Image (spheres, rainbow, N blue to C red):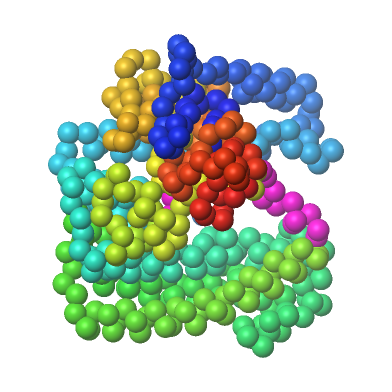
Amino acid sequence: MCFKNLPIEFDEQGRAHLKEGATDPYTYTSTRAVEDRQQRIEELLARNGHIKEVSIDPVTRVAGALAFHSVVDLENRTVHDAHSMATLFRGYEVILKGRDPRDAIYISSRACGVCGGVHSNCAAEAIEMAFGVQPPPMGIVVRNLGQAAEFLYDHPLHLFLLAGPDYSEAIIRSTNPEIWGKAEQAAAPNAAVHGFRTMADLMTALNPLSGPLYLEALEITRRAREMCSLVWGKYPHPQTIVPGGISTTISTQTFNEYQIRLFTLLDHAKRMVTIWDDISEFLYQANPGFHRVGVRPRHLIDLGIWEHHEAYDARYEHAADWGERRWATPGVMIDGELRTTSLHSINLGLEEFVEHSYYEGWAGGTPPYRTDPLGSPLSPHHPWNKQTLPRPGVGAGRRNTPGARRRAGTARWWRRAPTRACGSPPSPRSCPPTPSSSRPGPVCGWSCRRARCRR
């Protein structure tokens, strides 16, 4: 595997190193595309009365620190510009500096009241890796139980309390009356499972604060939070996740109480699948434009979750091994093609940029970490090298800093899509390459033992 921008190549053993002769290997050019586009939009607004700015700020149902801004042509029903922005400086990296490392578990979870357990687990694993602490198998299992319960809380919260009202009778009837008319006539295909005879009945059940599905979701999320509390002490913001495992006293009664709630949520989940199948298929038929919602290049990255109790040892040099044993495995997909499943490869390619954010850059000097523990090169823009340097006095308004739109950075992986047509092994580690003169690989000249790498 080689890359279009990052100057990293791999030797015959799959070890990463900087390309020879690269004088300034991590340089890049920041364009003025955002500033130029912003200027054109401002000229359109000043020149045309039918072009208006439409802002949703704050977006309270998702996050109070989120805003959406758009410029729309009301005559031609087109959108000239649309973007979201994070409006609040969080500053967790600044808060944690100089503190006891164990505080990160409890402080980082405050980033979110819905997914705090993920942040706590991440902080615990970072501390374990730094201190060389390996949790016992049961500690890993109980952590996973808490994380699974958090997902079971998060999903109905999203589907019925946050996103669900957008598809409810209260919204559809007023914004898309033509779709509501079709819903009154359309039979629900899975009525025998979920109990709603027509699509109109189903949408009415999604009405916020009054619909049966909305009210049921409140009860379901309560039970899932109880499951979290059984193993994490409380929720949100777990108290029992510690370096080396978990401090909960586990008994047979704990598992029984967890299991009783789990079975209830499993029954609910099976029913909910049919509800959202019906909603999706109906909307696709009622308005084919819904097929375009979310259409974008298939660039996906996932670090995986839920460590395997027999594999995780909290050692970075083994991360590619225990990463592939996670119950949900990691991977990167570029243009719909799987590029790597190695945590080492994923980590090497991570970078973060702040040109369009309300922060100062940090990559001017010598980076604290020029390589990872295995000696593979890291970009100065890698998160390990990041310094959070907010620009004081800016960010209160939308356009008071040219080109800046948010309090969040811009994360990238390899900056652009990698390519393998370079005569290098498939990845630094995802499978040990074996040179083969008799049966070379179709692109890179290497053969691989694993089927997923035979491209």
Among all residues in the image, which is located at the extreme right?
A: 76
The foreground one among 420 and 282 is 420
The answer to which quarter of the image holds residue 187 is bottom right
Seen at 66% across and 71% down, the residue is 277
Locate residue 10 relative to residue 83 in the image: left or right. Answer: left
Q: Find residue 357 and report its horizontal and vertical position in percent.
A: 48, 27
The foreground one among 217 and 106 is 106
Q: Find residue 310 and report its horizontal and vertical position in percent.
A: 29, 64
Q: Find residue 121 and report its horizontal and vertical position in percent.
A: 30, 54
Locate residue 386 relative to residue 43 in the image: left or right. Answer: left
Above or below, 360 relative to 140: above
Above or below, 361 relative to 378: above
The answer to which quarter of the image holds residue 360 is top left
Q: Is residue 417 visible in the rendered structure shown here?
A: no
Q: Find residue 328 and report its horizontal and vertical position in percent.
A: 45, 60
Give the number of marks. Answer: 0
Membership of 293 in magenta stretch: yes
Locate residue 43 relative to residue 127 in the image: left or right. Answer: right
Q: Is residue 231 visible in the rendered structure shown here?
A: yes
User: Which region shows up in magenta?
Assistant: 287-304
The foreground one among 131 and 356 is 131
Seen at 45% across and 34% down, the residue is 12
Seen at 37% across and 31% down, the residue is 376
The answer to which quarter of the image holds residue 440 is top right
Membership of 186 in magenta stretch: no
Seen at 28% across and 24% down, the residue is 368
Among all residues in the image, which is located at the extreme front?
A: 438
Above or below, 217 relative to 191: above
